[in-house]
Amino acid sequence: MFSPRAMLKAAVGYVRKNPDEVVRQAVSATGLTFGVPLATLRWFAGNLKGKKAPKDVEISSAAPALRFSAVVDAMGTPVRASAAIKIEEVSISADSIRIAIRLREVKLVLAGEPNDSPVSTLIQSGALDLSKPGNLVKFIPKKPPAVVEAEGDRIVLDLMKVPKLANDARVKRILSIVAPVLGIRSIETDRDHLWIRLRATPAGLPEAIGKLRAAK
């Protein structure tokens, strides 16, 4: 868990260094657009804890994509994985949160000395076709439950396939209220922000109000 005090301290420090951020966010919000500074994503990534947490995370922009690089544990072998991640589509309904992403410029490099592990051997051989990571994911024996489609460089996730979320009554209730009136038009980066552009659907307001009343 992240310390609220540490998060507040980091946020205050960022605003002090970037005093125009508050005005910029306020202006953007009038158009249902909200920006997440890449510095914020770097802060969260740098404060991840746990043995399985990625290490030495690097986050930058490859507009409109987000470039991500980190050292991960691949079956006991430390590997630096990197890719340009483009969020192509986000679809929210009462029972699903589908996110379609494109993975490009995927690279895997050993982060330590070569060894005899299967992962190390594969990377050294150059046999992996990293131009189509979706094809590799498609044939993983035990895919994460959130992966619902994988083909070429495109992977589609449905977060509501994750048991912890699927079984959470609060999440389902929030989705049933929000989905009829609010969606995500696009998620893209510029030089130093990740911009989330929302889509409002006023016609769905009666349905949302009905769900809200039923939830009380």
Image: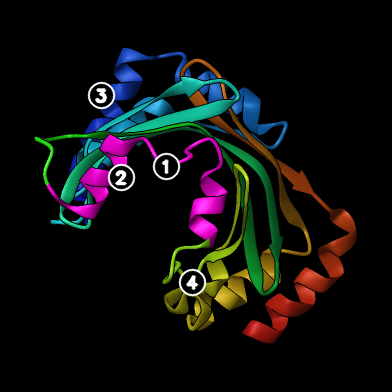
Q: Quadrant of residue 97?
A: bottom right
Looking at numbered disc 4 in the image, what kind of residue is underneath it? Pro
Q: Is residue 19 left or right of residue 62?
A: left
Q: Quadrant of the C terminus?
A: bottom right
Q: Position of residue 81 (x, y in %)?
A: 33, 37
- Tag 2 and tag 1, C-beta contact below 8 Å: yes
Name which residue lies at 77% across and 58% down: 181
Tag 4 residue:
145
Q: Earlier in the sequence, mark 3 or mark 1?
A: 3
Amino acid at the residue labelled 1: Leu
In what element is the residue under mark 4? Answer: loop
In this rendering, does residue 54 appear at all?
Answer: no
Residue type marked 2: Leu
Numbered mark located on residue 122 in the image: 2
The residue under the point 31% across, 14% down is 17
Residue position for label 3: 13
What whole-number distance in Å separates the C-alpha atoms at marks 3 and 2? 44 Å
Q: CA distance from mark 4 to mark 2?
A: 25 Å
Most foreground residue, 166 or 216? 166
Q: Name the magenta segment's main secondary structure.
A: helix
Distance between mark 4 and mark 1 Cα atoms? 23 Å
Percent of width and height locating residue 178: 68, 63
Read off the residue under disc 1: 128
Look at the image and tell me in which quarter the N terminus lies: bottom left
For residue 149, above or below residue 103: below
Q: Residues within 10 Å of mark 1 (few under 14, many from 20)?
A: few
Instruction: Tell me if label 3 and label 4 are in contact, CB under 8 Å.
Output: no
Q: Earlier in the sequence, mark 3 or mark 4?
A: 3
Q: Residue at x 83, y 63 (%)?
A: 205
Going by the image, does 79 lie left or right of 60?
left
